[in-house]
Image (tube, rainbow, N blue to C red):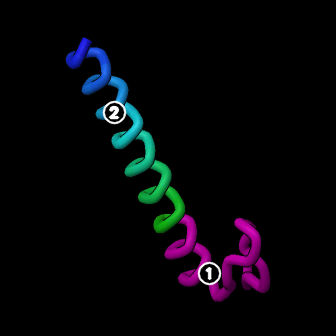
């Protein structure tokens, strides 16, 4: 039973880390394009 809980916890932690990484990459790409992230969308970009 403990193994099942540990696997579910690990999968959740990896998913959360992937989401945070993706948001950071999106923000960095938006800033490089001259925009800013507002509500999850890149606004004011030059492209």
Disc 2 designates what residue? 9
Res 33 label: 1
- Measured as percent of width and height from the top left, residue 26 is found at 56, 65
46 inside magenta stretch: yes
Q: Secondary structure at mark 1?
A: loop
Query: In the image shown, does 14 or 27 lie closer to the viewer?
Result: 14
Query: In the image shown, does 47 or 12 lie closer to the viewer?
Result: 12
Q: Residue furthest toward the front?
A: 1
- Give the number of marks: 2
Q: Residues within 10 Å of mark 1 (few under 14, many from 20)?
A: some
Q: Is residue 28 left or right of residue 13?
A: right
Contact, mark 2 vs mark 1 (Cβ under 8 Å): no
Q: Quadrant of the C terminus?
A: bottom right
Res 12 label: none
Vertical placement of residue 21 versus 11, above or below: below
Vertical placement of residue 22 versus 11, above or below: below
Vertical placement of residue 4 versus 11, above or below: above
The residue at 64%/88% (across/down) is 34
Instruction: Of the two numbered discs 2 and 1 on the same chain, state the one appearing first in sequence.
Output: 2
Q: Is residue 29 left or right of residue 11?
A: right
- Measured as percent of width and height from the top left, residue 19 is found at 49, 51
Q: Is residue 9 left or right of residue 28?
A: left
Segment colored magenta: 26-47
The residue at 47%/68% (across/down) is 24
13 inside magenta stretch: no
- Measured as percent of width and height from the top left, residue 39 is found at 76, 70
Q: Secondary structure at mark 2?
A: helix
The quarter of the displayed image where residue 33 is located: bottom right
Number of the front mark, 2 or 1: 2
Q: Quadrant of the N terminus?
A: top left
Query: In the image shown, does 36 or 2 lie closer to the viewer?
Result: 2
The residue at 54%/82% (across/down) is 32
């Amino acid at each position: 039973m403990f193994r099942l809980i540990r696997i579910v916890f690990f999968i959740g932690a990896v998913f959360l880390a992937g989401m945070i990484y993706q948001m950071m990459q999106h923000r960095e790409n938006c800033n490089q394009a001259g925009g800013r992230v507002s509500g999850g969308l890149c606004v004011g970009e030059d492209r």
